[in-house]
Image (tube, helix red, strand yellow):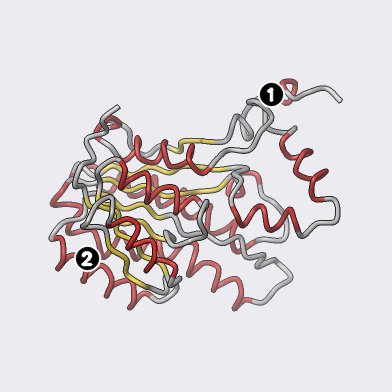
């Protein structure tokens, strides 16, 4: 399906993660669809991704940015504005489940909010004039933790809950400008970070299998490519009458009847 994303400027935060991460899958899917991925991330890995992406779409670019620093976010968006003169979509993808717990420090909690929530607000705030001009799209990458809790991660849970609130608020706020705002909610997606966690456990294989068995559809993890495919559809004109929605890409993990699960 042609998503009509050719030469659309799409800003993606948290887009210099390890190969196989959700951000990595999104930016290369965008380039392969003919869009112009614009990477915002603090990791220098983005320099190499920029080179690789430019072989697919020469206008691809990377802006090394600490997403906990609002002034750096503003600077990055200013540079993007000068280079392209437009932003057609923002995908707020950055997210770290950092374990800032109720028993941790206030500073840790605030740091978690800065990265996982405030950065979402700041990117959209500074990109807003260009989004208004393009009648663009906003897509926030969310987590089931906002809805189910997880334990031991109050900062991340609060931030991801806030992301869902912003998604709906922006859908209302910006509807007069033709700007759509949606969120993708992920449950169990097999990324390099997830793999690292599994490998750190003594019973990692057993734990992974037990998690898979809680996922109703096919008893398997969601892939980053499945997240990327849905993300591209939601920001595209093919999803032109969809706003204020929480789109779950989770194999039915959050909502479906547990009677569907394999019997032991």
Q: Which mark is residue 257?
A: 1
The quadrant of the image that shows the C terminus is top right
The residue at 32%/46% (across/down) is 30
- In terms of image quadrants, where is residue 234? top left
The residue at 67%/53% (across/down) is 195
The residue at 15%/48% (across/down) is 134
- The picture places residue 158, in percent across and down from the top left corner, at 57, 58
Give the structural element (helix, strand or loop) at label 2.
helix
Give the structural element (helix, strand or loop) at label 1.
loop
Q: Residues within 10 Å of mark 2 (few under 14, many from 20)?
A: many
Give above or below for 244 relative to 261.
Answer: below
Q: Work out whether residue 114 or residue 33 is closer to the camera in this orientation and state it.
A: 33
Give above or below for 16 relative to 258.
Answer: below
The answer to whether 94 appears left or right of 64 in the picture is right
- In terms of image quadrants, where is residue 244? top left
Question: Mark 1 or mark 2, which has the lower sequence index?
Answer: 2
- The picture places residue 226, in percent across and down from the top left corner, at 49, 37
Distance between the Cα atoms at labels 1 and 2?
Answer: 45 Å
Q: Which mark is residue 80?
A: 2
């Amino acid at each position: 399906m042609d998503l009509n994303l050719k030469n659309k400027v799409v800003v993606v935060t948290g887009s210099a993660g390890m190969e196989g991460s959700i951000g990595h899958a999104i930016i290369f899917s965008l380039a392969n669809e003919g869009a112009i991925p614009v990477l915002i991330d603090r990791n220098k890995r983005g320099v190499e991704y920029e080179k690789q992406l430019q072989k697919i779409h020469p206008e691809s670019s990377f802006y090394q940015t600490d997403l906990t620093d609002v002034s750096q976010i503003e600077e990055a968006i200013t540079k993007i504005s000068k280079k392209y003169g437009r932003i057609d979509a923002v995908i707020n993808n950055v997210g770290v489940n950092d374990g800032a717990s109720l028993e941790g420090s206030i500073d840790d909690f605030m740091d978690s909010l800065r990265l996982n929530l405030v950065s979402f607000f700041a990117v959209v705030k500074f990109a807003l004039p260009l989004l208004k001009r393009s009648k663009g799209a906003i897509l926030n990458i969310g987590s089931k933790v906002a809805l189910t809790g997880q334990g031991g991660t109050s900062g991340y849970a609060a931030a991801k809950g806030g992301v869902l609130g912003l998604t709906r608020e922006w859908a209302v706020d910006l509807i007069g400008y033709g700007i759509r705002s949606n969120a993708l909610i992920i449950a169990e997606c097999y990324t390099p970070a997830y793999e690292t966690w599994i490998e750190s456990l003594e019973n990692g294989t057993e734990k992974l299998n037990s998690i898979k068995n809680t996922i109703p559809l096919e008893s398997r993890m969601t892939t980053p490519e499945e997240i990327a495919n849905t993300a591209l559809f939601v920001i595209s004109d093919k999803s032109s009458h969809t706003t204020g929605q929480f789109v779950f890409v989770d194999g039915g993990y959050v909502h479906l009847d547990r009677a569907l699960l394999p019997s032991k």
